[in-house]
Amino acid sequence: MFLTNLFDQSFDFQARAWSDLGWEAVRTDDGSWSLRDLSGPSQELMHHRWGAYSETEYVISRVLPDVFKYVCDPFILNLGLGLGYNELRLATVAFQNKKSIAGITFEKDLMLLRLFAHTLMGHTRGADAGIVPDPFKMVYRDVFSLHPVEGLEFFLSLLLGQQWQLHGALNLRQLYEELRGKVHLFVWDPFSPKTSPELWVEEDLVHFLSWTAHPQYSWFTTYACNGVLKRALKRAGFHVVVMPGFGSKKHSLIGFRQ
């Protein structure tokens, strides 16, 4: 479902700490924040411990120049909002390159969507973010400090103008008519198959990618590298390239239709 009234100042954030939402805020080695999932048995961290923001830059920077080279107004699908690193990095690079972008983010934790939207509005526009408790604002303040104000403003304008939609959990088996043949760039950033197995089923991935990818120009980037994903990308018409992984990860993947 698309979230509406993201900036509703009457919304009641009853949680007072990250743990109330099932998360632990963790500083990674480059100083940037990540979140650890406390609800599952693996208690997986969203990012590599060597650097949440550094990993984001690595995964996105290796494909975005080509996307901007071949597509004037790319449509981007990001899976996993987390703390918003992907969205803000994409918006910042687009602004710096004078590019127009649009997109959609899928995130199963709806509270993360609301927290991000409220704190972004408060940080960039000086709006009252008093309804967001301080432990959350502290983390987002540090996240926002990694991006120029122009990038933050640009992404906020995309949200307010609905050029970028925030959506709940992704269902790979659903036919999203509004996404049919539309996606120029997939930023695939969910938890691992151990934590989110429903997002790593080969047949479902083939179906979803075949349905949503732009038929001529489409790229795919992810921190991950596994047989299921490689086979799914190839079956969906992507050329697959195995890349070095970030940090201690041995490999990662990119794919492209071009």
Image (tube, rainbow, N blue to C red):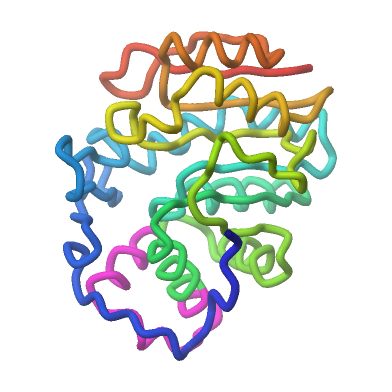
Residue 40, placed above or below residue 248: below
User: Which residue does the image show at 79% across and 25% down from the upper left?
Assistant: 217
Task: Residue 143: give x, y in percent of width and height.
Answer: 38, 58
Residue 149, placed above or below residue 201: below
The span picked out in magenta is 121-143
Magenta segment includes 129: yes
Quarter of the figure that contains the C terminus: top right
Left or right of 66? Residue 60 is left
Task: Residue 19: give x, y in percent of width and height.
Answer: 17, 62
- Quadrant in the picture for residue 54: top left
Left or right of 119? Residue 180 is right
Magenta segment includes 52: no
Task: Residue 69: give x, y in percent of width and height.
Answer: 79, 30
User: Which residue does the image show at 28% across and 51% down from the upper left?
Assistant: 33
Image label count? 0
Residue 11, placed above or below residue 139: below
Task: Residue 20: give x, y in percent of width and height.
Answer: 19, 67
User: Which residue does the image show at 47% across and 80% down from the upper left?
Assistant: 122
Residue toward you, 179 or 33 = 179
Residue 128, placed above or below residue 186: below
Quarter of the figure that contains the N terminus: bottom right
Residue toward you, 141 or 10 = 10
User: Which residue does the image show at 52% across and 84% down from the upper left?
Assistant: 8
Please tell me whether the stretch drawn in magenta is mainly helix, strand or loop.
helix
